[in-house]
Amino acid sequence: MGAILAAAGSAVGLGNIWRFPYETGNSGGAAFILIYIACILFFGLPVMIAEFTIGRHSRANTARAYQILAPGTQWRWVGRWGVLTGFCILGYYTVVAGWCLEYVIDSATNAFANKVSADYVEMFNSFVSNPWKPAVLMTLFMLATHFIITKGVQKGIERSAKILMPVLFILLLFLAVCSITLPGASAGIDFLLKPDFSKVNADVFLSALGQTFYSLSLGMGCLCTYASYFRADTKLPNTALSIASIDSLVAILAGFIIFPAAFAVGINPDAGPSLIFITLPNVFTQAFGDIPFIATALSLMFYILLSLAALTSTISMHEVVTLYLHEEFNLTRKKAAGIVTIVCGFIGVLCALSFGPLKEYTFFGKNLFDMFDFVTAKLMLPIGGFFIAIFTGWFLDHKVLRSELSPCRTLHPYIYRAIIIILRYVAPAGIAMVFLNELGLLS
Ligand code: PHE
């Protein structure tokens, strides 16, 4: 139960509440969401089942897992690729987690009171371009992750996830109702529910694919590592279905908070990574402006819960890299964790300052932060997922697959066959097509 909760804690995080709305906003709304749901069904769920299978059968960290299941082959590079991906995501993810900490402080000091929409945009911009604040808060968050990883208080995290996630969910539901009932919110609801396929292009498919892997923590061996702690009788397909459903529900709820409010106060849905930070304070102040105490309490609770949800995700990334260094290079756990914290912290500082002092340094028109976001979510994770699907569909002994997917033979044979067909053909071909399409080779 602990491992399953930890896996759900890894999946639910900033990917759902911060990244999903901004990708949806950039990609035109409802049509993106439909493509995203299709990606979850055809790529996300099967790859999650594949990672669970690899992890539970090998009972090892993601890099070692491939050496156990396919000794002497190059498959171990899939594991190493995952470790590298986790490392890169951790570097910039903690920056956004640091932004959440700033908003916890702002909520506690009542900084949102008596302001209008344009002020929130200004507040965010002046904060992210500050020469030191974002870097300090990012460092604090990285140290909190380090502390938990080295002190081994994972049990506490699992236990708090049990309480945290339901509370976060109820709060999101409540905020969605507040947002939907704001005057002028209906355009936002239309944006979420009325698909306009005329805006769908290759980028939209790549965004939906990347978001699927990102949000479900897939393609980098994170869930594989957690699954190595699953019990032998845990039903992998059912567990995957539960985690994917919870994760998608949280993301869609976040959409129903952000877009009605954004349209109600005149914020462009394609504002990018700043979207939730400039939109949400409006929900708190507009819905509860007359009762400032409630506005403060709600926003404080929201940002604390969001920071904790981010923490259960950063722990999972940190753990993958730490475990790899610890087990493969004979380092003590403490030393391994220290290396990860310092190197990722360094990347984090650079990314944190890439909206301020380092904003001149751009690559293909993107600052360092956007570059890390793009490369990890849209390239590294789907590439990892592609190879995980091929490994499980084509190279893993089918007896292993059958015994892991259905240890008590309770899985319907049609479902088993469907999973195999998707892992062998549908997922690899689909992911490859999204990439080829993006490169303009399919049109
Ligand atoms: N799934 C996490 C989120 O939604 C992010 C994450 C990605 C965690 C990859 C681990 C690995 O916030």
Image (tube, rainbow, N blue to C red):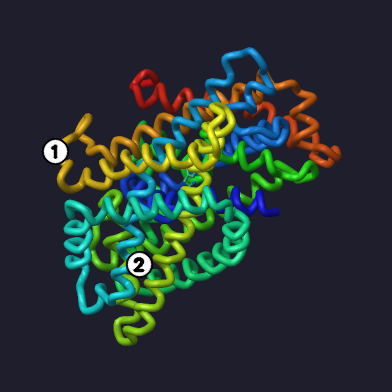
Quadrant of residue 376 within the rendered picture: top left
Q: Quick one: label 1 or label 2, which is nearer the N terminus?
A: 2
The spot of residue 229 in percent (x, y) is 69, 43
Q: Which residue is mark 1?
A: 360
Label 2 sits on a secondary structure element that is helix
Which residue is at 46% across, 24% downward? 433
Which residue is at 29% across, 35% downward? 371
Quadrant of residue 291 within the rendered picture: bottom left
Q: Would you say 63 lies left or right of 443 here?
A: right
Three-letter code, disc 1: Glu
Three-letter code, disc 2: Val
Q: Which image quadrant: the N terminus?
A: bottom right
Q: Which residue is mark 2?
A: 104
Q: Is residue 257 above or below residue 208?
A: below
The spot of residue 241 in percent (x, y) is 65, 47
The spot of residue 244 in percent (x, y) is 58, 48
Q: Whole-Å distance between the Cαs marked 1 and 2?
A: 29 Å
Which residue is at 43% across, 71% downward? 301
Whether residue 295 is visible: yes
